[in-house]
Amino acid sequence: MGHWNHHSTEKRQHAARAHQEVDFQSRRTVTLERQTFYCVPVPGESPWVKEMYCSSVQTRGCPPSSHPANRQKRMLEDDDPTRHGYSQQAGDAQEKCKRLEAERPERPQEMGVLSNPQSLDLYFPLRGEKGPACLVKVYENWDDYKVNDVLDVYGVLAVEPALSVLTEDSDLVSSLLDPAVCMDTQEEQRSHSPPTSLVPRIHAMVIHKLQHPNPVIPSSKCETEEGKKCVSSFMSELPCVRAELLGFLTHALMGDGLAAQYLLFHLISTVYARKDVLPLGKFSLNLSGCPRSGGFSRHLYGIMQQIVPVSHYLPMTIENMNLSRFIPRKDYSANRLVSGLLQLPSHTLLLVDETVLEQGQLSTTGVHNLTALGNLITWQKVDYDFSYHQMEFPCNINVLVTSEGRSLLPSDCQLHLKPLLCPPSLEQYTEGLMAATLPSLLNKFRMYLSLLQVMDYTISEEIIKAVEDDFVEMRKSDPQSICADDLHRLLVVARLLSLSTGQTSLSLETWLQAKELEIQRKVRLQGQKHMNVNEM
């Protein structure tokens, strides 16, 4: 928590605009409270999302500094001409900041920090992520923003080369920084005051919390009349888009139409509410029977990455499980939160590839990571490590597990893959599938999946009574294999089947279709079990 004095801002403005005067006696000259948020580019953001934002910016005539690698935060495409100005200012200001820091007299202690950007941990949750992080100064309503929220931030970028002086010379630091800041340890200063050329400061003026990280359906457009008409128009062609998407997913799964149906359900599932500790709406999927050779899971992920806005591929190797940091933890020496792999935004598709798992010993870290994955799947929460205690953070992540047999991880639904095709080269097969799919059709798939995740859904009292009566009859006819878990799964499948066809309420016909799908899935699993017994 910091303070912002209007005097300092007005003095800077006076220096920039000589014809303005500063009124030091103004009643509006007050001290404001502020909160600082450390923001990073959206983890796992798909390349097509970056390209779409870049294309929209270039269309508006912005310079190359608006490229996704340089922009500080995401932008929405709308009719306000000032919305794209921030990225340009940020890029120019960063260059100015770098020049100012380069012009300062170099000291031996400073060169070790500033000349080696890799020495500064930018705390990205995922390895290999690119793009600048930023410190966002928020002056109001900061309680509205939570960990892992995706935000659009518009504000004033502050160029403060003094903050880059991260040396052991405490006297010099004290002369450049606020005295309150200098009460921190040197490690805290390095963590909280990184070079502005690497971590810009943004004084937020407008912040939009995005309901969904998909640029095809920006939140602001959905609230306008034009946006509502666009959504209404899309809903009219939804049956055609659904049929095309099912065909696309069937090809991706080498001809397995039933698996395509369940994969579609998985992609449109979302946690829409929580009852006590139970997250409602989640539908984690274990796709068993996946071949170990040929890189099937990685190629499937490559296809999924083309139609979802945020995703991550996690090979479940012994090395990854033992050496990766899944759970965010508090670093008390630097007084900050160190990010972990599971610190992901809502609506992320996390594909866990269990086909690459070999025999080996899990370390203590590996066991903790496996437990964290299980808790994420079952409870949709991640327990952040604060050393002396753990704190639960709810999440909304779609976990797809590909495995050869039944997964070691829990799941809401297991489906055994039954491919009808056996292409000699999965890479060529995947490239051919993507080449045959028009970009305009891909955009429809992207809009379809994201829109259905935010649609409302209800069940009438009449249908509830019919479902209860039907389930009682199911228990009577097969009391050994039908249980309460089956009813819960049936209701989830019926909900997702309804939404996938554009229906916002359950009908008796859809309920019967969901039952038929579940029968087919169970028959396939039973058949696979018999085959495994015969092989033994």
Image: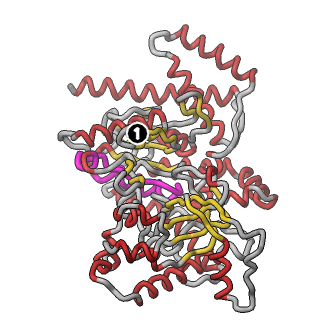
* Residue 412 in the image, given as x and y percentages of width and height: 47, 32
Looking at the rendering, which quadrant does residue 66 occupy? bottom right
Classify the position of the N terminus by image quarter. Answer: bottom right
Judge whether 292 appears above or below 69 on screen: above
Q: Is residue 6 left or right of residue 103?
A: right
Q: Which residue does the numbered mark 1 point to in the structure image?
A: 287
> What residue is rendered at 74% in x and 72% in y?
80
State yes or no: residue 317 in magenta: yes
Classify the position of the C terminus by image quarter. Answer: top left
Q: Toward the viewer: 240 or 2?
A: 2
* Residue 84 in the image, given as x and y percentages of width and height: 65, 75
* Residue 178 in the image, given as x and y percentages of width and height: 49, 69
Read off the magenta span. Answer: 294-321
* Residue 142 in the image, given as x and y percentages of width and height: 62, 54
Judge whether 113 appears above or below 407 on screen: below
The kind of residue tagged 1 is Leu
Badge 1 density bin: few <14, some 14–19, many ≥20, Cα 10 Å: many
> What residue is rendered at 77% in x and 55% in y?
228
State yes or no: residue 178 in magenta: no
Q: Toward the viewer: 380 or 500?
A: 380
> Most extreme residue toward the left, as rendered?
360
Q: Secondary structure at mark 1?
A: strand
Q: Toward the viewer: 508 or 196?
A: 196
> Most extreme residue toward the right, as rendered?
225
Judge whether 48 appears above or below 417 on screen: below
Q: Is residue 54 left or right of residue 370?
A: right
> What residue is rendered at 42% in x and 70% in y?
194
Q: Does residue 431 appear in this view?
A: no
Judge whether 105 appears above or below 27 on screen: below
